[in-house]
Amino acid sequence: MEYEELIRSDDQQLWKMIMSSSEADTFAAQGRFKVYPLSRRMSGSLVFLSLRGQEGDYLLIRHPAGARNTLFDEFSGFLREKDGSRLLICLQNGENATALRHAFPFTSPSCIGRSRSSFGVGDRLGIASPGHIPLFQDGTVVPVLAQQSLRELDLMGRTYRNVIDAATWAVFNTGYEGDWAADGDHLKDVDSVISALKQGCTMITADLSDYLSFKFMDTDIQTVSKEYSKLDSVLRDSIEARYRGTIKLSSSTELFYEEQLLQRIALSYNRALDHAVKLYQACWTVKKEFDFEISIDETILPTSPEAHYFVAMELQERGVAFSSLAPRFVGEFQKGIDYIGNTDEFASSFQRHAAIAGDLGYKISIHSSSDKFSVYPIIGRLVQGAYHLKTSGTNWLVALETLSRVDPTFFRNIFRRAYEVFSTARNYYHITPDPEIATDISTLSDGELPDVFRNTTDRQVLHVSYGELFKDTDLKDLFFTRLRHSIKEYWSALEAHIGRHLELLRR
Ligand code: ZN
């Protein structure tokens, strides 16, 4: 997208869409505001238009003289009144976002279902979405514009409502009318699930990792048999009938269960199944329609296709209608760097997982942790039906990369600070950067600064540092101010970077 066109100031006609000539002259003359032309909308007699100011965005609403429109009263702001015609200048805040979602349903997140592919972009900073939206205009893949884990919310001091509000405004300002979703990502307990849905999430990713016990995968068989015999006999009978010998799936995929393996899988996943049911039922107390994702990916051991099939079948058997399931794939999916592992091995394992999801009728979900460029074409080629893919935090890295080009002095400061806070920041994420290859930034010229984003250690250190860095609120404010100055460069860079993910998935 041409971001010059997304926010404009030069055209007096834009201002006169919503203002009298004299008001338009006043606003335009100040030179402090630009217009989002694609935001212009009508609802009944009301006219809406978004403005971009130096410090924040605004919504203007014109209520013509003589009309009566109660929607107008739902918004709050600074009122200018002349000859019965009213102009409300609203902050783009949470309260007005609620009114906006009421006025324009397309600014609310919605459910995606199982048959459409979806892509979790998330927006940790709350200002990235205009760079994502153009990539999804054709409707083939539904964006999850709001996608955050509790960890990210905590580190950024935000709530799900804040995240959804930011996406609502981005959608309105850019004139995007397609579907989009809001994911309460990696939630582990009933309270978080309920809270996320109440705040407006349309998707819940149920993280079952705390209820998985892989010790049974390699304990001696006597212990396994003993533990297995303690399981409910009705459950044992039913799973022994369901998972026996060879099970043939499409794409020539075969699963093979022998007694020992089944016992090990049942013991490893049984508590997780119960917990998934509990989380699913909790969702139902809030909403009747939501996307439910099962996440068993946050583990050390890869999920075997037999375990994946077992979990999916058992959940379906227990009435859990999930839209997607994320197994732990072979290899490593560390934050912000390419896949670590053998891509042929990944392909053959992914093909089996994708066949299971395709046969059982849900989407295979890949928690890519961003930037897994070497495996995206494999996913795109082998997926059956639709997929869900999550990126995470890459928007922050792209923001830093943008700053390294447009604001070298500030970037050097961030870079040094990121290494200072790294020993604390690394506790939040599983990453293994090699300190031997860390860049000595003082040896780089300004023009060479973007090179650090090709260094996997620098990338990872920067990637995980945001929470610790932003504890310094002065630095946080400065970061947002600087980035806001270069917002068009940032959005272009995001479009290119996330676009590369989607492009490779299409191959
Ligand atoms: Zn995950």
Image (cartoon, rainbow, N blue to C red):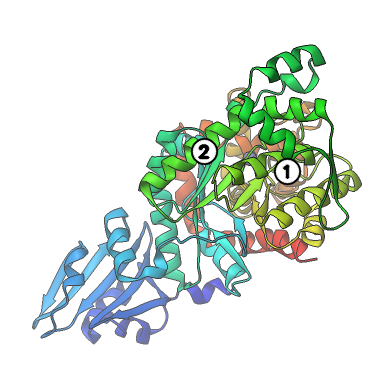
Q: Is residue 328 left or right of residue 191?
A: right
Residue located at (59% from left, 34% from top): 273
Residue 143 in the image, given as x and y percentages of width and height: 56, 61
The quadrant of the image that shows the C terminus is: bottom right
The quadrant of the image that shows the N terminus is: bottom right
| Mark 1 surroundings: few (<14), some (14-19) or many (≥20) residues within 10 A | many
Residue 216 in the image, given as x and y percentages of width and height: 74, 20
| Mark 2 surroundings: few (<14), some (14-19) or many (≥20) residues within 10 A | some
Front in this rendered view, residue 7 or 408: 7
Query: Can you identify the residue that label 2 sits on?
Result: 277
Location of residue 330 by image quarter: top right
Q: Is residue 215 above or below residue 417?
A: above
Location of residue 405 by image quarter: bottom right
Residue located at (20% from left, 62% from top): 77
Residue located at (42% from left, 56% from top): 166
The amino acid at mark 2 is Val
Q: Is residue 243 left or right of residue 53?
A: right
Residue 457 in the image, given as x and y percentages of width and height: 75, 35
The Cα–Cα distance between marks 2 and 1, rounded to whole angstroms, is: 17 Å
Query: Can you identify the residue that label 1 sits on?
Result: 309
Report whether residue 416 is seen. Answer: yes
Front in this rendered view, residue 445 or 154: 154
The amino acid at mark 1 is Tyr
